[in-house]
Image: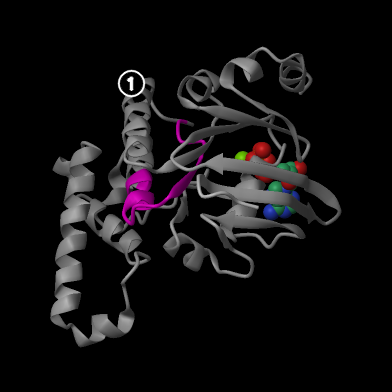
Amino acid sequence: AATASQVLKADGIRKAYRGVHALDGVSIELAAGSITGLIGPNGSGKSTLFDCICGFQARDAGSVVLDGRDLKGLSPQRIARLGLRRTFQQLRVFPELTLRQNLLAAAQAAPGFSYFRELLRTPAVRRHEREMAQRADAMLEELRLERLAGALAGGLSYGQKKLLELGMALMNEPKLLLLDEPMAGVNPTLVEGLKEELLRVNRRGVALLIVEHNLKLVFDISHSVYVLEQGRVLMHGSPAEVANDERVIEAYLGH
Ligand code: ADP
Ligand code: MG
């Protein structure tokens, strides 16, 4: 059973795409407030595991428990509202909206938001809007994007879009954030800032599960690391244990 200090327990996750076993019985446990790395060769099932945890893909088998609550049958939007957010390997910002509008759009999945209240525009709605606007501005400042608050997201550099996407995922203070290759394609000068931002977010109590090809970064910031290979957990251990494991080295060099 899940314990109180566990933010996520995924058990026996299976997923096949037309007979190809993308996930072949994967189980992971994440401690509340922890940083966990998820590594493995291309095609080992990392993104599929994210999809199956967040409800973007239906699982063939297995259970996911967030903070003691079984997520069976819940939509991705519902799961996000319960405090499980993710970023995507393929960026998903709205290019035709400003940065501030992007953050506000992301916040509409926040707890307490209701379209009926929006229609009625009660004082509670206006208070909620003011709160969200303040939160968006604070987020832009934290991401050092405040000068671009009114600019269209489509005009950002790739690295800035990644930062914005991170901010969008953080608007409703998730318990757990899944990051799919947050550093991929990011200018080396931005990587350090992005890393510091992830550590800041984690210090606020947000648990992180990070898929990332920059292994140095993963080993540097993770408390523990899972290694996937061909849809199975090859090993789980401390960064030092994983970095020095023969099977892990083999899994990477063998591909
Ligand atoms: P990773 O993120 O570790 O690179 P993926 O989860 O993307 O791995 O892929 C795992 C396996 O599942 C691969 O063999 C991949 O080709 C397959 N796969 C992933 N998504 C799909 C899909 N939508 N349709 C068919 N096969 C898929
Ligand atoms: Mg992937």
Q: In this view, does 167 lie to the left or right of 145?
A: right
Q: Give the range drawn in magenta.
A: 165-183
Specify the quadrant that holds the C terminus. Answer: top right
Membership of 178 in magenta stretch: yes
Q: Position of residue 45 (x, y in %)?
A: 70, 42
Q: Where is residue 20 in the image (x, y as percent from the top left)?
A: 83, 49
The residue sitting at 15% across, 70% down in the picture is: 127
Identify whether 26 is placed above or below 81.
Answer: above
Residue 110, picture quadrant = bottom left
Identify whether 94 is placed above or below 223.
Answer: below
Q: Is residue 53 left or right of residue 134?
A: right
Q: Residues within 10 Å of mark 1 (few under 14, many from 20)?
A: few
How many marks do you count on the picture?
A: 1
Q: Where is residue 85 in the image (x, y as percent from the top left)?
A: 46, 53
Q: Which of the two residues, 16 or 25, is positioned nearer the viewer here?
A: 25
Q: What residue type is labelled 1?
A: Thr
Q: Where is residue 219 in the image (x, y as percent from the top left)?
A: 53, 21
Identify whether 200 is placed above or below 95.
Answer: above
Membership of 68 in magenta stretch: no
Residue 63, picture quadrant = bottom right
Q: Mark 1 points at which residue?
A: 189
Q: Is residue 112 left or right of residue 208?
A: left
The residue sitting at 64% across, 17% down in the picture is: 241
The residue sitting at 63% across, 70% down in the picture is: 73
